[in-house]
Image (cartoon, rainbow, N blue to C red):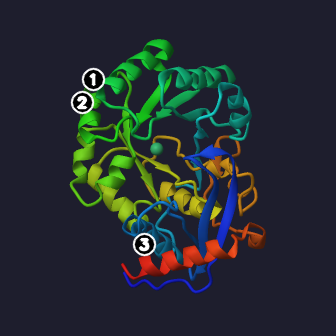
């Protein structure tokens, strides 16, 4: 791959509606290549080496047209951050028509309250729990059982219940609920990804963190599990590439986690990627009025330096 760094950069700040991953403003760098808009947005605490994979995705999408697409709209899941149960109806309302709901959980009690509040709003909801690796084996076994006992068959899967692949492997054999691998895939990029298939039922793939379209397809093939395409809290630009990635898989049995622009107070593409009747259309991003989102000078310099440093690793 011959890659060159973009010349004209836009460093933007997008305020979030609720704190997510411990941040309330998302910072991103966006730019335009011959193939259209692209986004480079590893979270600010990520190392240069980890961010290099994101940069490869960003440059690939700026330079190359999308691969062959098999559909023009994608079923989307709603995403519930860690919020009080009384905030649940308001957030779900922003995911128009979504009946698959991904709920961020940690401890059982408050997680269960969010599940209950969700089922009150959408009685036939399919629920996914996302633990982001927070449980050890004992906690995972007991929480999984408690969730299943209390709510029964409403669960589609539990996403990344533990960081440890060994815990996932054990849980995969014993849990009454299916297991999805998310962070595990990213962390094992350099090693044997085929192992993931012994530890999970579903593979969560993300356009930027996995290094772009070609890489994501190679990874999917190696793992050999059904895939769900999810976002890394990107702007509409990153989401447009996530949607194209989802559309580029001939089989896509599950709703995808690409409705996340609603977590921003406002997206740079306006309502272009606002979920409608449970779906998002696969389309190129058309950002507007970037000036309004422009980051302060010192943050622009920070991102430019970051890009230069990481660019040297290419
Ligand atoms: Mg996840």
Q: Which element type, helix, strand or loop, lies under badge 2?
A: helix
In the picture, the quarter occupied by the C terminus is: bottom left
Q: Nearer the viewer, residue 86 or 253?
A: 86
Estimate the x, y position of residue 73 in percent, counting from the top left. 60, 52
- Mark 2 in CB contact with mark 1 (< 8 angstroms): yes
Look at 23% across and 39% down and name the residue there.
Answer: 198
Look at 41% across and 65% down and name the residue there.
Answer: 47
- Mark 3 in CB contact with mark 1 (< 8 angstroms): no
When asked about the image quadrant of residue 49, the answer is: bottom left
Q: CA distance from mark 2 to mark 1?
A: 6 Å
Residue that carries the numbered disc 3 in the rendered image: 56
Estimate the x, y position of residue 162 in percent, counting from the top left. 35, 37
Q: How many marks?
A: 3
Please tell me the numbered disc located at residue 170.
2
Please tell me the numbered disc located at residue 124.
none
Asked if 296 appears above or below 107 in the picture, the reply is: below
Along the polypeptide, which appears first: circle 3 or circle 1?
A: 3
In the picture, the quarter occupied by the N terminus is: bottom left
Q: Which element type, helix, strand or loop, lies under badge 1?
A: helix
Asked if 259 appears above or below 117 in the picture, the reply is: below
Residue that carries the numbered disc 1 in the rendered image: 174
């Amino acid at each position: 791959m011959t890659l060159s760094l973009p010349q004209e950069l836009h460093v933007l700040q997008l305020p979030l509606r609720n704190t997510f991953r411990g941040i309330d403003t998302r910072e991103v760098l966006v730019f335009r290549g011959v193939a259209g808009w692209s986004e480079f947005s590893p979270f600010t605490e990520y190392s240069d080496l980890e961010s290099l994979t994101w940069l490869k995705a960003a440059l690939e999408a700026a330079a190359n047209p999308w691969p062959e697409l098999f559909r023009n709209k994608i079923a989307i899941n709603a995403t519930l951050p860690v919020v009080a149960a009384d905030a649940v109806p308001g957030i779900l309302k922003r995911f128009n028509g979504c009946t698959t709901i991904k709920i961020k959980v940690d401890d059982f009690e408050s997680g269960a309250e969010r599940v209950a509040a969700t089922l009150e709003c959408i009685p036939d909801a399919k629920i996914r729990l996302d633990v982001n690796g927070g449980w050890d084996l004992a906690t995972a076994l007991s929480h999984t059982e408690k969730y299943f006992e209390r709510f029964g068959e409403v669960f589609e899967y539990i996403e990344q219940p533990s960081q440890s692949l060994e815990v996932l492997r054990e849980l995969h054999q014993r849990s009454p609920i299916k297991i999805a691998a998310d962070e595990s895939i990213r962390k094992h990029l350099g090693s044997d990804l085929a192992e993931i298939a012994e530890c999970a039922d579903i593979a969560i793939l993300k356009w930027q963190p996995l290094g772009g379209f070609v890489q994501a397809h190679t990874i999917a093939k190696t793992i050999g599990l059904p895939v769900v395409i999810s976002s890394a809290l990107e702007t509409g630009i990153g989401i447009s590439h996530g949607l194209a990635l989802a559309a580029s898989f001939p089989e896509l049995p599950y709703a995808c986690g690409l409705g996340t622009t609603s977590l921003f107070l406002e997206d740079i593409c306006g309502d272009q990627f606002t979920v409608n009747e449970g779906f998002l259309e696969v389309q190129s991003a058309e950002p507007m009025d970037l000036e309004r989102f422009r980051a302060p000078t010192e943050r622009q310099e920070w991102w430019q330096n970051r890009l230069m440093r990481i660019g040297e690793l290419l």
